[in-house]
Image: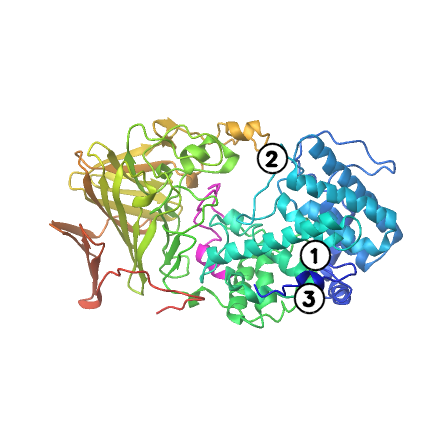
Amino acid sequence: MKTDPDWKARIRPDHPRIFINRDTLPAIRTRAATVNRDHYLNVRSFAEASPPDTGWAVIERPPPLPDGTEVRDWGHRMMCSAIVYLLEPAAERLARLVSELRASAEYYHACYAADESVNWYAASRAACLVTLDWIWDDLNANDRREIALRLLDHVDEALHKPGIRRRNGSDHRSGFYGAPSLAWFAGLLLHNEGVDDNRAARFLEKGYDDHVRLLVHRAAACGDDGGEASPTLGYAFGEYPLAQWNFIHTLHSSTGEDISGDWPHIRMFPNYVIWNWLPGALEFGYGDNTHTDNSMRTNWMYTHMSHIMHLFGRTHPEWAGLARYIRDMAGGGFLLDKWPIYPFLLDGLDSAPPVAGPDVLPPARHFENLGQIFMRSGSGDHDAYALFCGGGSLRSHRHYDATHFTIFKKGFLALDSGTRMGNTDNLQNYYAQTVAHNCILIKMPGEAPSPYWNGEVFGQAGGQNKTVGSEITAFETNPHFTYVAADATPVYNAEKCALMVRQFIFLPPDHFVVFDRVTSSRAGFAKTWLMHHANEPVVDGGTWRSDQDRGRILVRTLLPEDATLEKVGGPGREFLADGVNYAIDAGPSKLIVENKYPIGRMHYEEVPELMGRWRVEVGPGAARTEDLFLHLIQIGDQSLCAMSDAKVTVTGANVELSVSGTDEEIFVSFAARCEIGGHVTRVRHGKTVVEKDLARDVQAQAGLAKPD
């Protein structure tokens, strides 16, 4: 980060200086009257409305202040009211803001006196600190000091007081929207103001250092691809980016320093968005997702993409153009209940670069630090889309799912099953575990459960015991195929697993080949190959099919030669793990109940399809230490009735597969022992279109990768 080492000396001595300063206020006033007129009118209406009740804190609120102001958290509405005051000063509004600041501070202290958190998010409390900055010069010295000290004392408690239930104390490795984020706003507000300069200086330095660590962490997570600090999109596309926007804006407004160009990962964010975007504004449902409908998280998308357009429209038009495309797809607008100041800070949105859509993308993209590889046959409704999981370094909301894959074509055909909704025991006992994913189980009697954050895990179904540690050993993509090889051996218990390697090939437009080499420590440790479906599969010998929405998947087990197939699921058996069905409507987990999190029961007449209601389990017919699993997958719409012909030959050290379709033949071979490798050939209408050895290393990609 290329900041001045004497950055504190550059902080403006005057107020306002958080988001807004005297130099930028005229431009904000102009935007409020012109390009942001509609937003400003909405801000003014929200400022006069009743404050939203978050329903988070569980205390009995103190009585109103002597002037009748209700003691509660006024923060979100207060920021809107403060914007109106800045642009249309009025003594009555100033007096109301002062009362609401006092009432909010009283409420925060009442919460902490009861050892209860104010809210999981700190944005409303940050809004109070920002509001005080904006009206600072219009207050008398006594009011400034009284309110500032009350808020400063709360920030001190939020950072340091022990025993606060449900406090979000997460650090720079998360979304950074909990209590620790308040240090920066408090320090910036009270820098050199004589209120409590020692504490203000500590908070200022802590806030600055935390944000720098946050940027370093996210840059490492995104690499040269783009992304966020979590591959779970409810977080990554929700409030996680706000910490970056806030730091960029407030550092610039207070010191004049623009750091956006120093962190390339910020401008590459649209790349991660577009690879996750499925037809119909859907997403794959990775990580701690509800799986009710797998809708793309777009609530904040307009805001995030507008920031990319504003910050990089002139310097990196390719990223701004992609952001514009995504913003147009997402629709919506800026929000009022959190950070309503954003639109007034962003300029040049109408003159942003022209739209650049997904046609500029290659057939696949490896987000190596996030542990995800995305594949697609195109960008339309009739195309196939897949996600393969492996490698990566992030642990945030990540499951025991190395080598899992999700396949989509006109529907979710190979699922990531389970749900986070309701924070029931399903989350930590089923959904987060390997059994809920399209992976392989190795069952060792007596193995300890794999823990997860939502509460106690009661059993071990044979899954992985680490969420990170697998390795992508090979990746390549071209117009004819995409290939991934993953070594998941390190994420299984070493006492039961000597080898777990998966090779995954996408042969567009509609074929996949999955080859697994599995060696258990003992022959008696049962191996189970899993595939999850929304609806009941129809099994015919070694082949099965399942439908979802308008799509259909057909799967054929080619190895082991003595394979046994069993379909598992249906009412009361959808979420079996280690012999127990973890129903989604059984109420929150014990941990959630004891900590009084406001999450209630779910009521469904039947389990939603995308939570997964059936799975097929494939196992070897006899116990042995070494097994090979080979599966051919074919997808299409529901007119697809039969699979392509396939033949497999095992010759010592090699497995050879031939697939014959109407106008094409595919030949794939894999090394069954020793070094991971293989060969692929595609012959179309008698002409060889590709013939090559499978890669043994990882193909490099950087920036906005282009098709071959």
Reading the chain from its start, which is encountered first: label 2 or label 1?
Answer: 2
- Residue 538: x and y in percent read 28, 39
- Residue 315: x and y in percent read 56, 72
Q: Residue at x 66, y 62 (%)?
A: 7
Magenta span of residues? 270-295
Magenta span main SS: loop
**Residue labelled with disc 3:** 256
Residue 271 is a magenta residue: yes
Residue 527 visible within the image: yes
Q: Which amino acid type is marked by label 1?
A: Ile
**Residue labelled with disc 2:** 166
- Residue 434: x and y in percent read 36, 39
Q: Residue at x 17, y 36 (%)?
A: 624
Q: CA distance from mark 1 to mark 3?
A: 18 Å
State the image quarter where residue 155 is shown: top right
Q: CA distance from mark 2 to mark 3?
A: 37 Å
**Residue labelled with disc 1:** 341
